[in-house]
Structure formats: structure tokens, C-alpha cells
Image (spheres, rainbow, N blue to C red):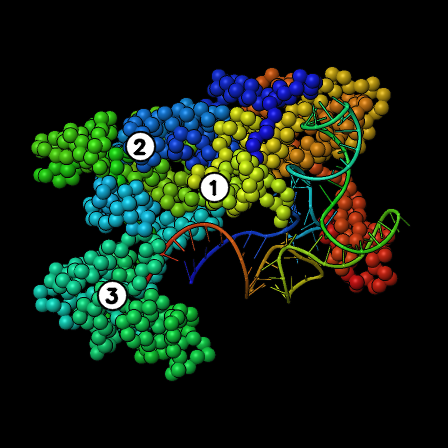
Amino acid sequence: MARNFKKYSSSPMTNIERYNARECEARWQKAWDNAKTFEVEIDPAKKKYYVLEMFPYPSGRIHMGHVRNYAMGDVVARYKRARGFNVLHPMGWDAFGMPAENAAMENNVHPAEWTYANIDAMREQLKSMGLSIDWSREIATCHPDYYRHQQAMFIDFLEAGLIYRKKSKVNWDPVDHTVLANEQVIDGRGWRSGALVEQRELVQWFFKISDYSEDLLQSLETLERWPEKVRLMQQNWIGRSEGVEMTFALRNVPADIDASGIELYTTRADTLYGASFCAISPDHPLATQLSSENSEITAFIADCHRLGTSQEALEKAEKRGLDTGIKAVHPFDDTIELPLYIANFVLMDYGTGAIFGCPAHDQRDLDFARKYNLNVTPVVIPPNEDPATFDVGSEAYVGEGLLANSQFLDGLTIGEAKKAAAERLESQEFEGRPQGTTKVNYRLRDWGVSRQRYWGCPIPVIHCDKCGTLPVPAQDLPVTLPDEITRDKPGNPLAHHPTWKHVTCHRCGGKAERETDTFDTFIDSSWYFARFCSPRSETPTDLEAVNYWLPVDQYIGGIEHAILHLLYSRFFTRAMEITGHVGLKEPFDGLFTQGMVVHETYKSKDGNWLSPAEVNILGEGEDRCATETASGAPAAIGNIEKMSKSKRNTIDPTDILEDYGADTARWFMLSDSPPERDVIWTEAGVEGAHRFVQRLYRLIGDLIARQKNPGSGAEKSSSQTVLALRTATHKTLAAVGASIEGLRFNRAVAQIYELTNTIAAFASANKNSLDEPALKAYSEACNILVQMTGPMMPHLSEECWQALGHTSMLADKGWPVTEGELLVEDNITIAVQVNGKRRAELTIAKSATKEEVETQALALDNVIRALDGKTVRRVIVVPQRIVNIVI
RNA sequence: GCGGGCGUGGUGGAAUGGUAGACACACAGGACUUAAAAUCCUGAGGACUUAAAGUCCGUGCGAGUUCGACUCUCGCCGCCCGCACCA
């Protein structure tokens, strides 16, 4: 489908003036700019409203997802502004990150140069959308004026004990000498080099987010204006579980190893009597100790490490273990000895890195037990099963039931048994302390923030042989990235920079080295919303500004950030509160996650992706098929998928903005699909949106023509049609306001269409003549219509507003006031049902009593026919709603 | 495996438990035009039937609650998303 849009000045024959979006949009954008319409300051007298869309990565080109995201945010911002709020609506750039480094390598440009050029290009594209953004507050996270504050806060956090260093495993690409993110490891190999990825241990910086697990979890309940789905995802991610941490005594430990017991964590203390083995992680300290003298163990552990960390690899991995020969003693019966294994499926960083296995009631343990021929003793018996005969086959029983084969726990429910077992463990002693204690565990891990890369915020610390690791003193900040870098060696250019990393220790004056790691870019985006409040302040935040503007009242972005970005930001805000940079814990009061922009995909006969421009679509429904435009060969219509370059189903917004204008693109993005759902991009849809742009312009033009020439006035307009038009206008006004407040933009659009149809019908029904009241109502309808389209199609609306004779800008005009009395109708039409089936309609005074409604309903012809002489058993009258006659 | 969501015409979708299909796209017919485009008007869930009207069926399938269910409950089927060896 080639775009066959019409040029605006196509036909010299037309006498109907067409709206020239290209000229108009540029003109109004300039007018807003010159008037500094959207620049805001703190104004304690006004209520504030902070609208924020997730800031973009400066890839160089905006995509349709941006258009949708920013169109939605702009509707909210402009609407709230019209409602009298002091609206903060800023924009910035999430400008550090890998694409710049990749581009740098491919095109031999400096990441900074590449990034700033992209920012300039994207700023222009965004500006052409006509967004009501305060551009004076623009920030870029890669700019030292931004990241120096991040460094200062890092040092504050460090001093507040929120940050620590520890050894941690990374995916290491031995060819590129670089650390890879999990998603960059494909089938155990580096995505760029193809080399087998190794697990390496590096000392890295961590934020203590896990200390805040409970707070982050609990506070989710206060986030009432967040989607339930996102709260659930975060809840699952935090992963709270209640269990028991306990010690198993060890026997048969090699002489030179100091281990009298092993700590392990379980949520199923009730199943202790079903235990048939214990297992520790290959990374467990005991495993490390054992490996130093046992080559078999060393080999096994190495084997486990070779297995990738990718989720698929883990998923498919077979459960494997190695018997250490050590015996673990059952805490309730010291005659029971369990073999202690090192097992590849036990995670070191959850719980204590050690477990007991109860195969009958845990699938993983069952798989393991079957493989190594261990006992499978059921201890929880499903209802209606006999403990003597109940057996577990290849599927562990994880349901409810009563305990059996469990001594003092026999006959208890799972809940009771958990409690009893925990109490017994607490009362028993092991080496002077309780053998077990109840413990809450979280899945959430501490946040590792070190990245072995150049294009990120330098971590402001130095390493001195004498003094150790020291934060860079405040007066020496920022630690800026060196401009001169070479890429002749693989790996992080900072790490082998000839001068940058060498410094003098500020404490001892001796030689020291800078930290060459940079921050995870999620840090950059964890506080930008706070920086927007005072983007040029000398401190990270200005308390007056953040106290006025925060929290963000409406945050809008993609669901893909449901967990990490939003959770990190919530944590970071807490850290900022502790260190006195903000005065609140939760940064985002209202959150909305919008759907993606998707498009059909097409494939040629030989399996190559085809772009939408390369195919013709014929037929509809089941007969729908495609052919290649060039050759006429049949093509396959594929799934509707997220726009992506690889599937060639992208539409470039800049083309659309040029051809149709921003208002058309915005209007289309807001129409039809509910904003939280995916929207399918179609050519027909855009054209439909564009037709409405022109239609609205003509509608206003018609009014103006009629005002100049109202006709003879001989035929008086009926007061009823005038009232009807006014009622429709004000009803729509109320409805559109409610729709925008609820972010139901598609409904607002439909309501505006409806009013437009009403106005057009009114105009054509009163073709010849309009008297004074009619003309006034007509004019009022058009004015209010234009005010309602203002937040969605701002340029066209300004143009119409001006044409309607207003001298000040629509952007500065308040939202129209609904005349309440017009919404109150005297007569209403309700449905009359017989046995739940609609048989008639009844128009009746709104104030009619139940009895009146009933009498009149029963007298309707259609009702009498439907009743067919049968006895009426009951009549349900819901005032102003419905009548249901039961026979 | 665990958690969540969705399923309505040819299409996107609308509908505080109260007239299902608003609004839009696509389609068809008409007007305007030498013609087309644009625009305007009209039509339309399916089946049956009609002079007008009307009747029946219909929100993935099956049950239930209710005077009344797209909406609430339960059980299936299908699709989508998130997490996933978290003991």
C-alpha cells in the first residue's frame, strides 16, 4: 500500500479551502514558543499537576510508540492546564547506554558526538508534534551537569550505608573483553563476538534495595492510581515468602574442613519427615572448601559454571548432583542421616544456598530423587487417600492434605504442621542457639550497578593501595568521562586509558586509581523526574521545587518498564529521602501503561519480510489476501506484531508528520483503541483521521459563512431544535471531560465525532435561515467543540479558534463550563421489557412516579401484544432506567 | 509450572447488572461532476417474514445467580503477557 495522500493544493478548481497542516502547525508552534506558553514556574497560589512521559533514548529517530506516548501525555497536560492547574510537562533524554558505544564502533564516531547529534534530530521531530512541553527544562543524562549530581548522591548514599561492594558473577565475553547483559547472551555465546561466554567474578557496587523489600511491597497498596497488573508484577518480583531457617548437623565431614552444621531455608518445614537428601549450591562456601581437596568435586562445580545463565539454558538443564559423602542429621531424629549433595539447581543467592529435598512434595526434588534413586516418602496425604497406599508417581503432590508418616505432626493440616515444626525447631538447641527460626525471605536481590563500559556515568571513587576504596571528595566532582579514547584494544576504554585513571590519593597523597566502571543506566532514569523540578539547580534537587512539584501526578509509559525502572525509581526515591534530597517515598502517584503500536506483517513466497509499501491487499474477512506490488506474486499475510525493523513492518512517524501533519497523527493515535491496549496502525485509519481534521475545519468555516450571511430570518428556528443542540453540546462537554480525566481517549474521540455529526445535521436542517438564538447555539456548539479538540489537535484547534474571532490563544483559554441545567431533561425514553426482552420504548416525564410509569408501560400497544392476555405476575420499575414486566 | 489478562459485526472497538453493536474504518447505493477525486446523503449483526410492521437467534463454549448477564460466579476451549529450578 503506497501512501497516496493528497497534496493540499492539488486542484485549482476547488473553492473549498483546505486546511494546510504543514503551514499552520509550524506557525502555531512558533507562536507558543515565542509566548513561552508552556514554560512554568513554582506558583504556590496555584494547584500543580506534573505530567511525565517516560523520556526517550536518543536513537536518532522517533518511532510510533513515542508518538502515541507523547500524544497521550500531551492531552492530559493541555487538559489539566485548561482546567487551571500549573502544569509541569518536561522532556529529556536517557542518553547513556550501549547503542552509542555500538554505533561508535561501527561508524568510528565518538559516542558523545553521536548522542548529541541524535538528540538534536529527535528534538526537532518531537517539536513538530506540537507538544506542550517546557523545553527550557530539557536535560540529558549524559551531560556532566546532570550526572555530577548523580555522583554526589552516590556518595551521600554510600555514607548513609545504602551501598556496598561485593564479588559477583558476570557474563564475560573473552573475545570482546566485555561484560554482557543476560539478553546479550544467546545460546551461551556473545551476541557480537559469538564467543562462548564465561562466568567471571568481579567486585561490583550494589545498592541495598533488598533491605527495602518489605517497604516496597507494603507501599504498593498505597499506589491506588497504578494499574493492578503492574502492582502484581512488582509484588511477584519482590517475592515474599515465609519459612524457617534451620541447621542440620553434619557427620562424616573430611577432617580438615570446619563444618559442624549446614544452614538451610525452607517454606515447607511441615514436610521435614519426607526429607531424603540435602543439597548445597555449587557456589556454597562448603562446596568451595570441599573442591580444594577433591578433584571430582572441582570438576563438577566447573561443569555447573559452564552452563549458561540464560533462562532457557537453566530451564532445559537436567538436574544433576554429586554426593559429597557427608551426612546431614535430621533435626527431629538423629538416627536419620541424609546424604549431602552438591546440586546444580540450588541457587546460592536465595535463602542460604542450601536445601533439604522432599521429593514427594516438590517437583524438582522428585526429579532429582528419581535420578539418584532416593527415597520418596509422602507425608502429606490428599483428602480421600489412604496413607498406607498413597504413592507419588512422577508428579509431586503439592496440594492440601493431612500429615502422615511424620511422628508428632501426624494428622495435622499443612498450616498446623508448619507451625508445630517451627516451634519444635525453635525450642531445640544447636551449638547454643535455636536450631531453627522463622524467617521471611524475598526473591528481590540487591541491585548491582557496576557496568564495565565507557558510555555511562563514572562511579566517583578511587582505589588507593594504602587507604582502600575512597569516594571522590565533593569539591573534585564531577568525575567526567575523558573525551580522548581509543578503541584499539577490546573492552572498556576507561580501563586502559593512559592518563585518566591515574590519580593522587587525596588522603595519603600516594598513587591511586580511579574506578573504571560506570553506572547502570537505570540509575540515570531513577531520579530524572526529580531533576526536572529544578533542572539547573546547583544541588541535585531544590527542596522547594521538589516539594512543590513531586510526586508526578500522571506518569505514562510502556509496560516493559513495569518492574525494573519503576522499582528502581521507587527505591532511589527512598534513598533520596533518607539523604535529604526529596521529601517523599513514592515518586509516581498515577501510572498509566500504554499499549504498543503494532502492524500487520507480510512475507514473500521465498520467505522474506515485505514492508507494507511493497504489498497490495485485496478482499476482506476470510478472502483477504496480499500480492507483491512489484511482481504481482502472492504474498503471505503474517501476524500483527510490534513494529520492528527486522520484520519490516515499521511506519516512520516523520513521514506521517510531513504528509498529514501532527494533528492527524495524534488524533489517530488517540482514536479507536483503548490506550492500554495495542493499536493497529492502518493506512485507512490515518486517512480517516485526516478526513476529520479537514471536516472540522470546514465545519467551522461553514459557521463563519453563516454568521456573515444568516439568511432572511423569515423562518423561525424552532426553540426545540435549538435546545436540543445546546443539550447535546453540554452533554458532550461533560462526557469528554470525564473521558479525558479517566484517560479513555478513544471514548473522548467518539464523543467528539458524535457532537460533530449533530452540529452538521443541525446546520443542514436549518439550511435556509437561522434566527438569533439558533445562530448563537450553533456558534456555542462550534466554540466548545474546538475547545474540546484543543488538547488532542492543538494546531488545528488554535487555527479554528482564531477563525472564530478570538484574539487570544486557545492554549491560554480555560476549559468551558458545563451548564448544568441543560443536562437535566424533562422527558426521558426508557425501554420496556417483557420477561427480560425489549418490546417497546416509553417516553415519559423524568419525574413520573413508579405507578405512572407502570400504568403507561402496560398501556403500550407492543406491550399488550407481547402480553397476549397473560396475567402480569410482577412489574419491575427502575426509575429512569427500565421497566420489566414478568408474566 | 506459577501469576495475570483477553475473547462482542467484514475490521478497530462502545456499553455504573438495565434498549448489545455508540463512534470510526471498510463496504454498498444515491447526489454533485463531462469524468474522477474530494464532499454530502442513505443503508447495513445473522436468519425468517412483511403492505406497514414483526418474529427468532446472537457478545468463545457449557452451566449457575438475577425480574434482567457482554458485565457477577463456577467449569471448559482458544489467544496474549509477565515470572520461572526462589526450596
The kind of residue on which mark 2 rests is Glu
Pick the front one: A246 or A827:
A246
| Same subunit, tags 1 and 3 | yes
Q: Which residue shows up at 37% across the image and 45% down it?
A: A564
SS for dot 3 = strand
Q: In whole angstroms, how far apart are the C-alphas of marks 2 and 1?
A: 25 Å
Report in which chain the residue with disc 2 lies: A
Q: In whole angstroms, how far apart are the C-alphas of marks 1 and 3?
A: 46 Å
Q: Residues within 10 Å of mark 3 (few under 14, many from 20)?
A: many
How far across and down, in percent of the image, does residue A394 sit?
38, 72
> A857 left or right of A454?
right
Q: Which residue shows up at 56% across the image and 20% down it?
A: A24
Residue wearing tag 1: A609
How far across and down, in percent of the image, does residue A706 sit?
74, 20
Which tag, 2 or 1, sits closer to the chain's start?
2
The kind of residue on which mark 1 rests is Trp
SS for dot 2 = helix
How far across and down, in percent of the image, does residue A255 sit?
9, 68
Which tag, 1 or 3, sits closer to the chain's start?
3
Marks 2,3: beta carbons within 8 A: no
Pick the front one: A258 or A375:
A375
Snapshot quadrant of residue A252: bottom left
Pick the front one: A711 or A36:
A711
Q: Which residue shows up at 64% across the image and 26% down it?
A: A694
Residue wearing tag 2: A106
> A874 left or right of B73?
right
